[in-house]
Image: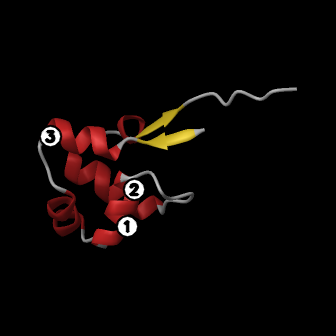
Amino acid sequence: MIRIILSEILGKKKLSRKKVAELTGVRANTIGDLYNEKITKINLETLNKLCTVLECDISDLLVYEKDIISE
């Protein structure tokens, strides 16, 4: 499973979702969905804007957690 940890980054940087939407030009609803990990796809342009505004790498936004598959 790949998680988007935007909420953690915004908390550390003390930024609101509204402010990030304004700075990136990404719809507030999209930022909210990313923040709440309610999306299954993300546009590369959106990732680029987030990394630019938040001054971070993709690896700071996305975390891979191995799925536990029962047999």
Q: Mark 1: which amino acid? A: Thr
Quadrant containing the C terminus is: top right
Which residue is under mark 2? Answer: 34
- Residue occupying image coordinates x 26% and y 40%: 9
Q: In the picture shown, does residue 40 fall above or below 14?
A: below
Q: In the picture shown, does residue 53 fall above or below 68?
A: below
Between marks 3 and 1, how big is the CA–CA gap? 19 Å
Q: Mark 2: which amino acid? A: Leu
The disc placed on residue 50 is none
Quadrant containing the N terminus is: top right
Q: Is residue 68 left or right of residue 43?
A: right
Q: Position of residue 15 (x, y in %)?
A: 14, 50
Helix, strand, or loop for circle 1?
Answer: helix
Badge 3 vs badge 2, beta-carbon distance below 8 Å: no
Which residue is under mark 1? Answer: 30
Q: Mark 3: which amino acid? A: Lys
Which residue is under mark 3? Answer: 13
